[in-house]
């Protein structure tokens, strides 16, 4: 009947075409069941059967490898039941957007390298997100000796073209952080990956980057990636985000309450994420220019109507909602002033909101992070999104919403053709000792990012 077809469709939307495992605990994590009611109705990218299979297998693997006395499985993976369990422990030390993009990348690496992903429990993630894997936890035990695990003696170094470390250890450590330079670190190479897999049941990674584009460099990973994400436009990130990041009830309630109160009645919603990063000197030196560029972008792209000097225009009844997320209030103030001081040419009303006023970054402050996540969610509920170059905060919002953003630069503003984040790293590459000629051939699979010229993006 029609009724059951409709409820099937809404059921499919609710679990994103079986991307999410079946769950019963509705109250514990409302976002999982309510997410499909906000933001985009249609999901352009249906997950592949292969991805769904791999996720269900992963969930079993994760539950089995983390079962029982947590101390025991951490200290030894030689117990018969767990002999095939290998782990990767994620440690982060940056803002929320950086955490989300790097956890997504680390999870994909875990899938490809058949490891169990564990998250540093000290990172306030418990308060922000629900557990993604059923019947188990993705948090490392609280007594894992983090400082010990990330000490230099475990650091993998491939500098001399020899794979692996010389140490007789079961544990290795790697950093993929801002400024990461792939020359001299052959982590994304077949032979080295094989070696890491054979030698180290424990791998610890400190990362704040979306290193997925470089996973495509490892031939065996690439074969698997093409099966997991078979379409031309892979949309890897939005699948990972939809699978991994379900806001806790506190963050979800904050976002949806704001939405229901201020945004729900709008005929169109536009999200604007304004962040000026130190690497983008031209913008930060002239923040006022960035504000002007924002207004230009919104008008030229027809996301918002222009204003008029005439006073006899009749109202159209149309309301456009604009969410401005930023640590700097001037963008919100400037935009609202434009629309309260003059009527719009088409008679619509433009409501400008700023859901939070945090002013500065306070990473790992629970209340601050909850507001940051709520801001990301509210941006992701908007049909159109404008983001700032290089900001992982914006990447997280575009991933949560599955929205291809308009990228704001000082002079230009254009709609991107992908929701994939940029890997902020130098892209020269070579897996053997003669890196420069090899580097050229391997770069064909990827392109430089529209927002960060020195970065790498999956095409
Ligand atoms: P990135 O530095 O832009 O790559 O993004 P991150 O999310 O990693 O770090 C920026 C941090 O600053 C966020 O996690 C927030 O704590 C804070 N922040 C930046 N922009 C905003 C914003 O628009 N709203 C709120 N609430 N916090 C923000």
Image (tube, rainbow, N blue to C red):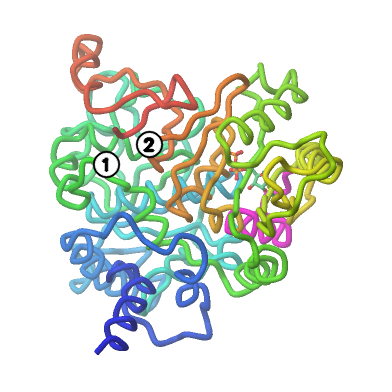
Give the quarter of the image for residue 447. Answer: top left
Task: Report how far apart the C-alphas of labels 1 and 2 lie in the structure.
Answer: 9 Å
- The magenta region covers 360-377
Query: Which residue lies at the image location 60% right of the left edge and 54% below the top edge?
Result: 269
Could you say which disc has been placed on residue 151 in the image?
Answer: none
Q: How many marks?
A: 2
Q: In this figure, which residue is indicated by the disc labeled 2?
A: 417
User: What SS does tag 2 mark?
Assistant: loop
- In this rendering, position of residue 266 left or right of residue 419: right
- In this rendering, position of residue 310 left or right of residue 128: right
- Is residue 354 in view from this perspective? no
Q: Position of residue 329 (x, y in %)?
A: 80, 41
Q: What secondary structure predominates along the stretch shown in magenta?
A: helix
Front: mark 1 or 2:
2
- In this rendering, position of residue 383 left or right of residue 12: right
Please say if 380 is above or below 64: above
User: What SS does tag 1 mark?
Assistant: loop
Q: Position of residue 119 (x, y in %)?
A: 46, 58
Query: Which residue lies at the image location 23% right of the left edge and 30% below the top edge?
Result: 163
Q: In this figure, which residue is indicated by the disc labeled 1?
A: 233
Query: Which residue lies at the image location 36% right of the left edge and 58% below the top edge?
Result: 117
Which of 214 and 149 lies nearest the eye of the viewer? 214
- Marks 1 and 2: CB-CB under 8 Å? yes
Which of 76 and 399 lies nearest the eye of the viewer? 399
Q: Quarter of the image containing the N terminus?
A: bottom left
- In reply to whether residue 374 is colored magenta, the answer given is yes
Query: Ligand 1 quadrant?
Result: top right
- In reply to whether residue 233 is colored magenta, the answer given is no
Which of 154 and 226 lies nearest the eye of the viewer? 226
Q: Position of residue 196 (x, y in %)?
A: 24, 41
């Amino acid at each position: 009947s029609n009724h059951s077809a409709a409820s099937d469709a809404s059921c499919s939307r609710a679990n994103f075409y079986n991307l999410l495992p079946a769950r019963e605990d509705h109250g514990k994590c409302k976002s999982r069941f309510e997410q499909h009611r906000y933001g985009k109705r249609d999901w352009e990218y249906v997950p592949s059967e292969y991805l769904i299979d791999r996720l269900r297998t992963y969930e079993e693997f994760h539950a089995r490898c983390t079962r029982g006395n947590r101390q025991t499985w951490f200290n030894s993976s030689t117990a018969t039941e767990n002999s095939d369990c290998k782990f990767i422990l994620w440690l982060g030390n940056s803002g929320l957007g950086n955490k989300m993009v790097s956890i997504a990348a680390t999870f994909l690496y875990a899938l490809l390298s058949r490891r169990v992903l564990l998250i540093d429990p000290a990172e306030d993630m418990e308060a922000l997100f629900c557990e993604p894997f059923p019947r188990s936890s993705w948090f490392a035990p609280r007594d894992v000796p983090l400082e010990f695990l990330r000490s230099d003696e475990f650091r993998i170094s491939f500098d001399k073209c020899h794979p692996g470390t010389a140490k007789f250890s079961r544990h290795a450590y790697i950093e993929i952080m801002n400024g990461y330079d792939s020359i001299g670190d052959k982590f994304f190479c077949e032979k080295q990956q094989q070696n890491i897999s054979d030698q180290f049941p424990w791998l610890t990674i400190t990362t704040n980057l979306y290193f997925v584009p470089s996973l495509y460099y490892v031939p065996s990973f690439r074969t698997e990636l093409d099966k997991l994400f078979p379409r031309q436009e892979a949309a890897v990130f939005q699948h990972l985000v939809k699978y991994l990041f379900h806001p806790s009830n506190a963050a979800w309630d904050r976002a949806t309450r704001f939405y229901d109160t201020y945004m729900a009645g709008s005929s169109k919603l536009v999200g604007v994420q304004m962040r000026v990063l130190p690497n983008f000197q031209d913008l930060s030196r002239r923040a006022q220019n960035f504000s002007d560029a924002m207004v230009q972008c919104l008008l030229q792209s027809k996301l918002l109507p222009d204003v008029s000097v005439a006073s006899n225009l009749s109202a159209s009844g149309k309301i456009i909602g604009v969410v401005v997320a930023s640590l700097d209030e001037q963008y919100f103030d400037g935009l609202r002033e434009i629309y309260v001081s003059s009527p719009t040419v088409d008679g619509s009303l433009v409501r400008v909101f700023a859901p939070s006023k945090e002013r500065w970054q306070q990473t790992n402050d629970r209340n601050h992070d909850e507001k940051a996540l709520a801001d990301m969610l509210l941006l992701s509920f908007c049909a159109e999104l404008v983001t700032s170059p290089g900001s992982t905060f914006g990447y997280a919002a575009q991933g949560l919403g599955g929205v291809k953003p308009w990228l704001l630069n000082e002079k230009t503003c254009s709609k991107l053709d992908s929701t994939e984040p940029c890997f902020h790293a130098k892209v020269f590459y070579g897996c053997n000792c003669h890196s420069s000629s090899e580097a050229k051939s391997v770069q064909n699979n990827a392109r430089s990012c529209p927002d960060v010229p020195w970065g790498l993006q999956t095409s």
